[in-house]
Image (cartoon, rainbow, N blue to C red):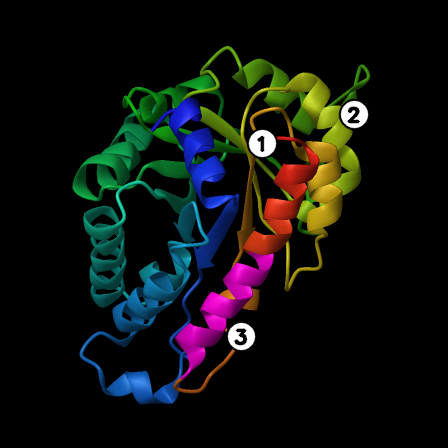
Amino acid sequence: MNQSSLFESILKKRSYLCVGLDTEIEKIPSFLLDNPDPVFEFNRRIIDATHNYAIAYKPNVAFYECSGAKGWISLEKTVRYLKENFPEILVIADAKRGDIGNTSKMYAKAFFENMPFDAITVAPYMGEDSVTPFLSYKEKWVVLLALTSNKGADDFQYHDEDGLKLFERVLSLSQKWGNVNNLMYVVGATRAEMFRGIRKIVPDHFLLVPGVGAQGGSLDDVTRYGMNNKCGLIVNSSRAIIFADSTEKFDTVAGEKAKEIQLEMEKHLADRNLI
């Protein structure tokens, strides 16, 4: 999946929504706990209810790793269910990997060969050789951490040296490693005021934007400052969709919440004359 096919998916669904599958077994409806794999069953029903409105899904790997081997089984079943039933949908491993080259090569193999993810989030702070093993896979994406939405981002990402903040250096330098067809950037929705400057550095790349919904980010602000002429945004919502209801209708409510966001996105796309 390249930039053009991703944009086509956005136009077809009139949406740039990513549903985050941050599935905590403590939060899923209790009646699912009788299922042999309650996490996968929860994910399957969420996917079935929301796939018409989403162009991407983003399982956060930590929520599966914490359960050991059975968590990995649930994760792999979720990814394979998506690819077998909805192959046009981008599936992102929110894994935030980043290590020396040999280790990154093994991480890339794990997520791109042994599990059919389309993209993976990667931390850039060990430099180019820690990122390029992921970029060696054709038709796969690296989603590089640039400016995150957590409070601790202020500790390092805004460090200014010679008039260039650290996250700006990440954006500038990393463009030598990849291109608009295999490299995206994570930019938190709660930092919407920074999108205008970010777009001056990376005008054409897609941005993966977490933080809309439960974390308080504004879709209006993200769109106003971050959208480009090929949309250029994948906006993630997790808890506000998947945990919107805890009854037997949880999947129906999740679908309704996803549709609400999709309709808002459709309006933004129309306002930009993209649809």
Q: Which element type, helix, strand or loop, lies under badge 1?
A: loop
Q: CA distance from mark 1 to mark 2?
A: 30 Å
| Nearer-N-terminus badge (3/1) | 1
Instruction: Say whether disc 3 or disc 2 marks the residue closer to the N-terminus.
Output: 2
Classify residue 117 as left or right of residue 7: left
The image shows residue 185 at horizontal and vertical percentages of 55, 31
Q: Nearer the viewer, mark 3 or mark 1?
A: 1
**Residue behind mark 1:** 231
Q: Are marks 1 and 2 in contact (CB under 8 Å)?
A: no
Classed neighbour count for the residue bearing mark 2: other residues with Cα under 10 Å, few (<14), some (14–19), many (≥20) = few
Looking at the picture, how far across and down is residue 37, in whole percent? 22, 74
Disc 2: which residue:
160
- Crowding around mark 3 (Cα neighbors within 10 Å: few <14, some 14 to 19, many 20+) is some
Is 72 a magenta residue? no
| Distance (Cα) linking label 3 and label 2 | 40 Å
Asked if the magenta segment contains residue 253, the reply would be yes
Marks 3,1: beta carbons within 8 A? no
Residue drawn 22% across the image and 82% down it? 35
Q: Name the residue located 65 percent from the left edge and 46 percent from the top edge.
A: 267
For the residue marked with disc 2, what is the amino acid? Answer: Asp
Q: Residues within 10 Å of mark 1 (few under 14, many from 20)?
A: many
| Magenta-drawn segment | 249-261
Q: Is 13 positioned to the left or the right of 104 in the image?
A: right
